[in-house]
Image: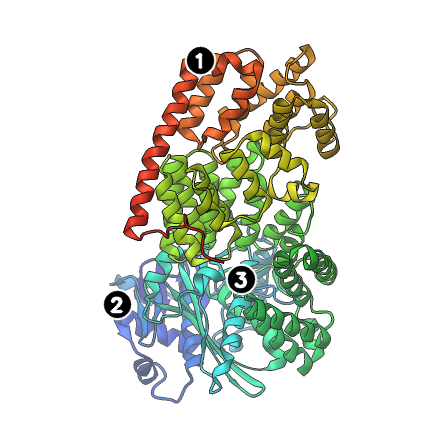
Amino acid sequence: MARQIRFGDWHFYPDTGVLEREGAAVSLEPLVASLLEYFLDHSGELLSRDQLIAEVWEGRVVSDDAIRRAVSSLRRALIVDGSDKLITTVHKKGYLARLPRVEPLPPEAAVRPPAEPALPAAPVVSTTSSAPQAVAGSFNPAMARRPLLLVVLLLLVMLASAWGWLQRPPPAATAMDDPPYTLAVLPFVDLSENADNAWLADGLAEELLGLLGRFSAFRVAARSSSFLFRDPAASPREVGTTLGVRYLVEGSVRRDADQVRVDVRLVETDSGFQVWAESYARGLAGLFALQSDIATKVARALQVVLVESEQPDTRVLDAAGLAGGEAYLEYLRARQLTSSWATDDLEAAALALQNTIALAPDFAPAYAQLAEVMLIQASRGGEQEGPPKRELAATLVEKALQLDPDLAPAYTIRAGLYRDPGDPAVEADLKRSIALNPSYPKAYEILAQRLFASAERRQEALQLIDQARALDPLRARLHHVKTYMTFDLCQLDAAEDLARQALRVNPGFPASLVMLGHINSWRGELAEAVKLQEQALAMDPHSIWTRQHLHNAYLVLGEREAARQVDDSSLRSLWAERLLLESPASAGELVYGSDAATMRRQLGPWPETYSVLAAAIDSGDFARARRHIEERFDFDGGLPEHIDSAELAALVNMVLIWSGGSLDSSGQALMRDLDAEMARQDAQAPHCLTGHRPLARALAATALGEPGRALDLLREGQQRHRLAGGWYRLLEVQPAFAALVAHSEFAALERGWEQRLAAQRALLAQLRKDGTIPDRRAVPPA
């Protein structure tokens, strides 16, 4: 009489090893069948390794790997609807089975013979080689003694089932905001006796992170977030909650000369249970291929089908043998050095990558990484060193893509090399990078910034930056990027919340202090803006961007000496000082005397044309102003076919210059077109970042003979934007605007501004008295 055990929807026959559910049966190996029977007898109990060896393996000497394989086989047999929740691994303690309760059987059920196995166990498919594979359930040895025909029929049924499985289409790429599996790869622990191998542990973990991110089935937290968890005191649940992931990949690395041992485990964050673990021993030559092996095992543990095209090609380094291993070590060392952005580290990284290329000339990632190093150095090299570095980066990235057209980071690097950010090729490269690695936050970040420049695509940009933030929640810069996007949409409260979130993630991130100051200045709280931006400058004294913001805040308050102590050398600083403390016309004379490249880089079209218009009104020399905008902007009195949002305000100035300050019928038609487009864009997406926008619209309304509407726009601008007194002066000197300037409400606007300035100057004096900010009014001795 065959024994039968019924639990849940399963019927289990321990004597033959057959497990049956809903008419489908699999045959378990004898040890796996014994393991299931023991788990059924001890369901809900935490069973140690020693208990399993004593009871299931009857005290025989067995390896941890043998136990893991048996448990894994049983898990596969018990999977229902893709769910694997019945047997969990408790890290360093053992296994816990939560199986359905065993139910008593009616007398007739005990003698019913078990069904013959007709289906393989639920397969785990991994196309890591060119031929598809299926992992099926094993046969009971007794089957070999059955009639040959029965065995042949059984094999045919099993092969047909496996073939049907393999013919199913691969799963569709999952949307970023709802992936089936969310992972984080934590920094591996360096257990080497030689303490200088931390870069190797970090490098292997980072490379594994990048590889897992290539698979559309996974969403993988970015390095800059997951690598902050080096403290073993943080529980898996804490890490999972912070990073928004369900699983953690942890590991350790021990290097001994040319041999490396890597231990890796997969842990569920909610429970802390170990889903899978394995140890690897490799020579240096096999390290690169190891990443693919680990990724495959992680996917198998989660019952994920991997697509072969997403796997890296390891043949380049494999073919190089020991030299390939040395090349990979140099590459990993360079990756670690690049992450700091320190000048000395970048030089060392460039040298290590040159060594990599010398040892393995066809290793594409080395060329891409060296291109990134060159691009970083170019951003710091000034006008002399920058262009040659960019040219070298362009050559290197093209070489990388020639060697590996599916190298995602290379497309992101190339996108940063285009001269025109609006070039369609930029967007195409960034989207290609995202398609190749859906977990690469840098591509989302850059694409979001590019798209945000277009009013029609701002919502798309916000979604992209949110995807980057989800992938890299502990990187302050991503919260900062969304801060200025939200600020530009005039959502000041939301922008402030984002800036403070960035500072919670990284209290030492000065850019968010600058943005908080900027938000305060737009609210008219100029003293608070100075305080926050002085704090930012103390953190990073060499930041030109911080100095520019602080310089402007002091100028708006009328603090010429303090502003000059912060920044008195750049064209932008000199222009702002003349505009706000002298006159727009004097700012225009400064523009006339400056070279085009510097103006384009430091001022932009609106400040330049605004100042030239003011100088023309002041001197009456419109011919000179016309020549300037013809040469600088190729303006011929008409509007271009396509007008970018950033060009609208400058075009208002240019139309006024071309018309000599008084619009004829054609000039009025052009101005109406510009006015309507600015109104349309502001209704669709209000602008706060560009404080000149309300003034440009007021200029257009006044020129069109609508002073009442111009006053409304100025009033709104003063409420929402930082409009200093200097910005009104162009209206005061233009005869056509006399009706507006004479209006009592215009004078009230100016008085209101001066009263706010007086109150803020008093607060600034108190901050100096308290020692909260430095007193920059006294010029230090030479």
Q: In the figure, residue 588 lies in which quadrant?
A: top right
Q: How far apart are labels 1 and 2 at the CA level?
A: 84 Å
SS at mark 2 in the image: loop
Is 733 situated above or below 11?
above
Would you name the residue on which mark 1 appears? 743
Judge left or right: residue 219 versus residue 284: left
Asked if one can make out residue 145 in the rendered structure from this viewpoint, the answer is yes
Q: Residue at x 56, y 70 (%)?
A: 337
Q: Earlier in the sequence, mark 1 or mark 2?
A: 2
Q: Position of residue 614 (x, y in %)?
A: 60, 26
Would you name the residue on which mark 2 appears? 44
Closer to the camera in the image, 475 or 49 = 475
Q: In the figure, residue 31 lies in which quadrant?
A: bottom left
Closer to the camera in the image, 490 or 103 = 490
Q: Position of residue 211 (x, y in %)?
A: 56, 63
Amino acid carrying mark 1 in the image? His
Asked if one can make out residue 178 in the rendered structure from this viewpoint, the answer is no
* Tag 3 near tag 1, CB within 8 Å: no
SS at mark 3 in the image: helix
Q: How far apart are labels 2 and 3 at the CA level?
A: 33 Å
Closer to the camera in the image, 569 or 114 = 569
Residue density around tag 3, few if under 14, some if 14–19, many if 20 or more, within 10 Å: many
Q: Earlier in the sequence, mark 3 or mark 1?
A: 3
Amino acid carrying mark 3 in the image? Leu
Q: Residue at x 41, y 50 (%)?
A: 778
Number of the label disc, if any, that sits on residue 212: 3
Eye-nearest disc, 1 or 2: 1
Q: Position of residue 708 (x, y in %)?
A: 47, 12
